Amino acid sequence: MVVDSTRVEQNTTAELQRPGQQSSFVRWFRNTGWRHLVAWLALVFALFPVIWIISASFNPLGSLQSQTLIPSNVTLDNYRELFEETDYAYWYRNTMLIAGGAAALQVLLAAFAAYAFSRMRFRGRRTGLLTVLLIQMFPQLLAFVAIFLMMVQIKGVFPAVGLGTKIGLLLIYLGGAMGVNVWLMKGFFDTVPVDLDESAKVDGATHSQIFFRIILPLVAPILAVIFLLSFIMLLNDFVLADAVLGQGSSKNYTMAVGLYRFLTDQFNQRWGPFAAGALLLGLPVIVLFLFLQRFIVSGLTQGSVKG
């Protein structure tokens, strides 16, 4: 009888505590828990393609049909096939040179234009800004035929910068340097106090010294952001790169053009090498982001104004 009365008391206590515990869990899930659930679902959704590509690059079977999330064996055969049977090393070098060089020059040209529109007052300034914005509204594909015909004509006069050359593709990319980049930089330049320019002029600094030694270090965050975005955009460009470089030697291809032609008509059989090439292409973006994030998160004009 003693044991039964103890069990009855324990059951009664558990029944009294259970509704309270359930209500506290439901309250926690309504206030906070559903955010954790959404975060985990978003994390799985974002990481699944990355894990799938990494798994495919180390899968010895190398085909799309035999692809599994976790390969049975890990091998570097896909990377070996990529470098031995294709001009992947040339494609990689060309992509880094063209995308990196064009992104750096785009940032420099946009900085020149943004500084002029922000600091100087001249006739046609407002019209120029509106024109830059208006031209940016038209899709670049509208100029695709015109660019191709222009490059064909240039090749007849200057073969070194015409159709099928890397310099020609870089010059085409520089043509798109203006536009939204100028507007983004101008807004950033406007936040830098003009007093800095005037103080430097009083000390005898020239316009070039003010621009390179005072203004550019202060606007480093926007320069880093625009360089990173431009580099990623040029890294993934296929249409213009295929139109310009697709007519020449395969050693002049960029990564997008080379991998596309490598996969043509054999996508299923060459899935492993393609995944290996795509994975290697993503490494420079990760390294660049890790290097530039200290500029992105740093303050703009912190400590720049004395007194």
Image (tube, rainbow, N blue to C red):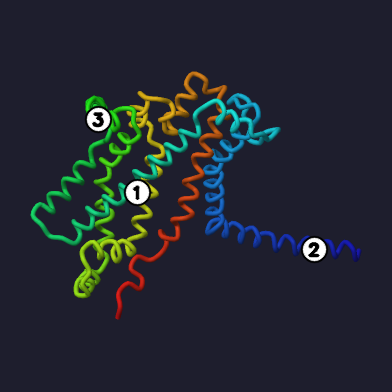
Residue placed at 53% from the left, 39% from the top? 280
Mark 1–mark 3 CB contact (< 8 Å): no
Mark number, residue 10: 2
Pointer 3 local density, CA inside 10 Å: few below 14, some 14–19, many at least 20: few
The amino acid on which the numbered mark 3 sits, given as a three-letter code, is Phe
Q: Report the side of 223 relative to 63 (left or right).
A: left
Identify the image quadrant of residue 59. top right
The amino acid on which the numbered mark 2 sits, given as a three-letter code, is Gln
Mark number, residue 158: 3
The amino acid on which the numbered mark 1 sits, given as a three-letter code, is Ala
The residue identified by callout 1 is 104
Q: Secondary structure at mark 1?
A: helix
Residue placed at 46% from the left, 46% from the top? 285
Question: Where residue 11 appears, x then y in whole percent?
Answer: 78, 60
| Front: mark 1 or 3 | 3
Q: What is the CA distance from the residue labelled 1 to the residue labelled 3?
A: 25 Å
Against 179, residue 172 (above or below) is: above
Question: Where residue 133 appears, x then y in whole percent?
Answer: 20, 46
Question: Where residue 84 appears, x then y in whole percent?
Answer: 57, 28
